[in-house]
Each structure stands twice: as structure tokens, then as C-alpha cells.
């Protein structure tokens, strides 16, 4: 149990907390990087939109993965979720910003997607067959629908959570539970189709029935890896150290380990099914990613996205050490970007590995804006649920 005085002092972010300074620096870095990226967009529009797509997928994945973890916590319960609930909610409240960040991609559809070119469709029977689904008006309509669903679910999750803070009620908890059950289904369906639209259709001749699940698993993993450094930063030299305790870090480390294994399972399953099937319309996707230098990125994913984090997170002591766990989480975030790069970039450069300076600049630009929005949301509300049973003290019983 948490002492009442400790909980009260831990509710809000201090004015001089390092995360407050990080918000301002992130915004400045983001605006500066986007200004430089605009120069790159003028010089090389196709490369700009390719780099922007990867950056967008990464940062949007944190917001969407946070929403998925939040709903999972409402269904399963547990102290691990109660202590990070506000951190997850802050990420979900950035979804309107994510929707705005999607708009530049609308301008780059012709630079990204082969199926948007009338002449290409006219000479390709496969594209003609898929044209009822892969066309610009329907693509944009689906995107509007996806964001409408995500923002609506996030809005109700946040609104009812605040109601529970103001007046604890069993009915509010029940509503959140039922919303999360339906919301997880909606998220899974919409994100599956969004993954098909935004990523898989970059190579419209190829398809995978597990692709949406692979993207979803990556988003949840990215969100968990992002939350852990925030938890450690909030716990440092503050009353929250008692709440974000080593046992909580241990639980979060176990979840990170579980999500890493889940991603590895999905990735290997897709590879095994396609490689064993050996169908000419499926295997070229992997062939372009296993030669020309791309194979080394694949090796890096095996080692740094699975083997090393798995071995490290088996250690109980490491998971209870904030600094070491943060180092692992940051490493996972880095390799998550590499994974997205490996999924997207070979569609445009299948013959050889290609890395451009815009990849870094656009990532910093989009990330700076999103991170600033996240930290602004984080400071606007209490950092911990105020009437959650996990925080009931003996004095208040």
C-alpha cells in the first residue's frame, strides 16, 4: 500500500522536472529539423516522403500501441498498468496530432504508391484486379475512418478515466472494461487494414495474411519500450520513487520481454510460412531484403531485436535496475526504427541498401513535434489515478 501523503505529492509533474525542459527542447529540435526537411523535400520529393512515412509509422505506433496496452490493462487489471495508465493516456491524447502529421503523406501518394499511377494500373493486370480497393478516394476515406475510430476510442478512455478520478464508481470501471474489450477488436481490425494500406501496398503484388498482426505487435512493443524510460525519469529523486518501485519495474521488464517474444513469433511465422510455401508472388519480398546489403539489417534485427534483449531481460536484477532497464528499452526503440526501415525502404531500393540524410532529419522533426505534444499532455493531468483500488491506503480503508 502507498501512504496517502506520498501519493498526494506524487500526483503532478514538478515545474523544474527534467521532462519539462525536454518538452521545450524537443519542440525546438522538431521545428528546426522539419525546416531542414522542407529543403530536402524541395530537392528530392520522393526521398522526403519515403523518410516521412517511416518516421510517421514509428511515432504513430507509440500512440496506437499505448492505446492497445491501456485497453489490455483495463481488461486484465494489475498494479503494473495502474502506475503507467496516465502515461499511456497521455500518448493516446496525441492521436489528433498524429492525424495532422498524416496529412503530408496525402501529398506524397504518387511518390510512394505505384497503384496511384493510372498508366501503371492500365498495364498491370494485378493492379487492375486490386483497383476497387487500391484507389485514392477509397484510400483517403479509409484513413479518415481509422483516425475517427482511434480518436473516438481514446476520447472515451480518457473521459471516463477522469470521471473515475472525480467520483469513483463501479459503473465507470465497468464501462471502461467493456469499451476496452470492443476497442481492442476495433483497433486490431482498423490497424490491420491501415498496415495493408500504408505499408503493404507499397509493393502491391505481394501480400501476407499475418502482416497486420506483425505491425500491431511492433506498435505495442514500441509503446512499452517508450513508457519505461518515462517511468524511470519520473521516479528519479521524487516522491514517485516509492510508487514506481523495483517490483513495478520488474513487471514492466517482464512485459517488454513478452512483447519482444511476441514480435519474434509473428516475424518468424511470416518468414516460415512464405519461405516454405515458395510461391513466386510471395518470396520476392524476402529476397529483396536478404541481399544487396539489406541482409545485414536483417541480421541486426535477429541479434538486437531478439537475441540480446531476450538474454538481458531474463535477468531479474537487470529488470529491477532503472538505468539498466532504460538502456535496454532505448535500445529496443532504436531497433524498432531499424525494423520499420527494413520493412519499408527495400520497396524503393530492392537492389542495394540505401540510407539518406533525410531519414534522420525527418525522424527528428516528426519525433520532436510528437514528443513535445506528449509531454505537454503529460503535465496537464495527474500522473497517477486518484481513486484506483491499487492505490488505496490503509488509512483510507
Image: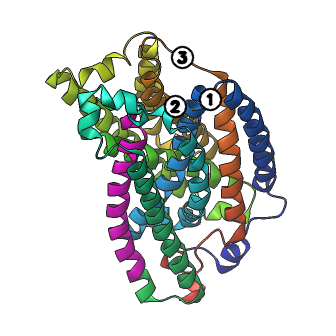
Q: Which residues are magenta?
A: 174-202
Element class at badge 1: helix
| Residue 376, above or below 337 | below
Q: Residue at x 81, y 51 (%)?
A: 24
Give x and y (percent) for residue 302: 40, 25
**Residue 208 visible in this rendered orientation of the protein:** no
| Residue 351, above or below 152 | above
Give x and y (percent) for residue 214: 35, 41
Residue 317 vs residue 34, the one in the foreground: 34
Q: Nearer the viewer, mark 3 or mark 1?
A: 1
Which label's residue is closer to the chain start, 3 or 1? 1
Residue 193 part of the magenta segment: yes
Give x and y (percent) for residue 324: 60, 39
Which label's residue is closer to the chain start, 2 or 3? 2
Q: Residues within 10 Å of mark 3 (few under 14, many from 20)?
A: few
Q: Which residue is mark 2?
A: 111
Residue 88 part of the magenta segment: no
Q: Quadrant of residue 282?
A: top left
Residue 354 is marked as: 3
Which label's residue is closer to the chain start, 1 or 2? 1
Residue 4 vs residue 374, the one in the foreground: 374
Q: Residues within 10 Å of mark 2 (few under 14, many from 20)?
A: some
Give x and y (percent) for residue 227: 57, 52
Q: Are marks 1 and 2 in contact (CB under 8 Å)?
A: yes
Residue 45 is marked as: 1
Q: Residues within 10 Å of mark 1 (few under 14, many from 20)?
A: some
Amino acid at each position: 500500500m502507498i501512504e496517502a501523503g506520498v501519493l498526494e505529492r506524487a500526483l503532478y509533474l514538478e515545474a523544474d522536472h527534467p521532462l519539462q525542459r525536454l518538452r521545450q527542447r524537443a519542440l525546438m529540435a522538431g521545428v528546426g529539423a522539419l525546416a531542414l526537411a522542407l529543403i530536402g523535400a524541395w530537392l528530392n520529393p520522393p526521398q522526403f516522403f519515403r523518410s516521412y512515412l517511416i518516421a510517421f509509422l514509428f511515432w504513430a505506433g507509440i500512440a496506437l500501441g499505448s492505446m492497445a496496452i491501456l485497453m489490455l490493462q483495463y481488461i486484465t487489471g494489475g498494479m503494473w498498468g495502474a502506475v503507467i495508465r496516465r502515461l499511456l493516456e497521455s500518448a493516446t491524447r496525441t492521436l489528433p496530432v498524429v492525424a495532422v502529421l498524416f496529412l503530408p503523406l496525402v501529398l506524397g501518394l504518387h511518390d510512394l504508391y505505384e497503384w496511384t499511377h493510372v498508366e501503371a494500373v492500365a498495364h498491370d493486370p494485378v493492379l487492375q484486379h486490386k483497383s476497387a480497393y487500391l484507389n485514392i478516394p477509397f484510400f483517403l476515406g479509409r484513413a479518415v475512418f481509422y483516425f475517427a475510430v482511434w480518436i473516438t476510442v481514446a476520447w472515451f478512455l480518457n473521459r471516463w478515466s477522469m470521471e473515475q478520478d472525480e467520483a469513483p464508481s463501479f459503473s465507470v470501471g465497468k464501462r471502461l472494461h467493456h469499451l476496452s474489450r470492443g476497442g481492442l477488436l476495433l483497433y486490431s481490425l482498423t490497424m490491420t487494414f491501415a498496415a495493408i494500406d500504408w505499408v503493404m501496398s507499397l509493393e502491391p503484388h505481394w501480400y501476407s495474411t499475418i502482416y497486420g498482426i506483425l505491425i500491431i505487435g511492433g506498435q505495442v512493443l514500441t509503446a512499452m519500450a517508450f513508457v519505461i524510460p518515462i517511468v524511470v525519469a519520473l521516479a528519479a529523486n521524487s516522491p514517485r520513487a516509492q510508487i514506481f518501485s523495483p517490483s513495478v519495474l520488474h513487471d514492466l521488464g517482464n512485459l517488454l520481454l513478452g512483447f519482444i517474444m511476441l514480435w519474434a513469433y509473428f516475424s518468424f511465422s511470416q518468414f516460415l510460412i512464405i519461405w516454405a510455401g515458395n510461391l513466386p508472388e510471395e518470396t520476392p519480398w524476402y529476397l529483396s531484403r536478404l541481399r544487396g546489403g539489406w541482409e545485414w539489417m536483417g541480421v541486426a534485427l535477429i541479434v538486437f531485436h531478439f537475441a540480446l534483449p531476450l538474454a538481458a531481460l531474463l535477468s531479474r536484477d537487470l529488470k529491477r535496475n532503472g538505468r539498466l532497464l532504460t538502456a535496454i528499452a532505448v535500445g529496443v526503440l532504436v531497433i524498432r526504427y531499424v525494423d520499420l526501415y527494413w520493412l519499408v525502404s527495400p520497396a524503393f531500393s530492392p537492389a542495394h541498401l540505401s540510407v539518406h540524410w533525410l531519414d534522420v532529419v525527418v525522424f527528428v522533426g516528426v519525433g520532436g513535434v510528437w514528443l513535445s505534444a506528449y509531454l505537454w499532455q503529460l503535465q496537464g493531468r495527474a500522473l497517477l489515478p486518484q481513486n484506483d483500488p491499487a492505490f488505496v491506503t490503509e488509512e483510507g480503508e
